[in-house]
Image (tube, rainbow, N blue to C red):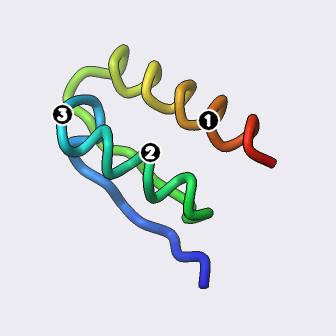
Amino acid sequence: MTRTIVFVGATSGLGRRAALRLARDGHRLILIGRDPQPAAARCAELARTTTDET
């Protein structure tokens, strides 16, 4: 079952790894971050990662 998950703290560390895993598992993520630049970089990374696998 694919879920939509609102994710806080996905720009580094454990949150980054968890976001990658959730995205690879096919879930839709909504990322919330304090600084837009790292959040945008993480979104781009997630898009590349999930696009490469399909």
Amino acid, disc 3: Gly
Residue lying at the far top of the rendered structure: 37
Q: Hey, which quadrant is residue 26 in on the image?
A: bottom right
Contact between labelled residues 2 and 1, with CB atoms less than 8 Å apart: yes
Q: Position of residue 22 (x, y in %)?
A: 45, 59
Q: Which mark is residue 16?
A: none
Residue lying at the far bottom of the rendered structure: 1
Task: Give the mark nearer the N terminus: 1 vs 2.
Answer: 2
Secondary element under disc 3, as helix, strand or loop, is helix
Q: Which mark is residue 49?
A: 1
Q: Position of residue 47 (x, y in %)?
A: 63, 35
Is 48 rendered above or below residue 4? above
Amino acid, disc 1: Thr
Contact between labelled residues 3 and 2, with CB atoms less than 8 Å apart: no
Q: Which mark is residue 20?
A: 2
Is 4 rendered above or below residue 40? below
| Structural distance between the alpha carbons of marks 1 and 2 | 8 Å
Q: Quadrant of the N terminus?
A: bottom right
Circle 3 sits on which residue? 13
Identify the residue at horizontal 23%, vertical 29% (top origin).
Answer: 12
Q: Residues within 10 Å of mark 1 (few under 14, many from 20)?
A: some
Secondary element under disc 2, as helix, strand or loop, is helix
Identify the residue at horizontal 66%, vertical 43% (top origin).
Answer: 50
| Structural distance between the alpha carbons of marks 2 and 3 | 11 Å
Q: Hey, which quadrant is residue 16 in on the image?
A: top left
Q: Position of residue 6 (x, y in %)?
A: 36, 61
| Structural distance between the alpha carbons of marks 3 and 1 | 17 Å
Amino acid, disc 2: Leu
Secondary element under disc 1, as helix, strand or loop, is helix
**In this view of the protein, which residue sits in the foreground, 22 or 9?**
22
Identify the residue at horizontal 51%, vertical 69% (top origin).
Answer: 4
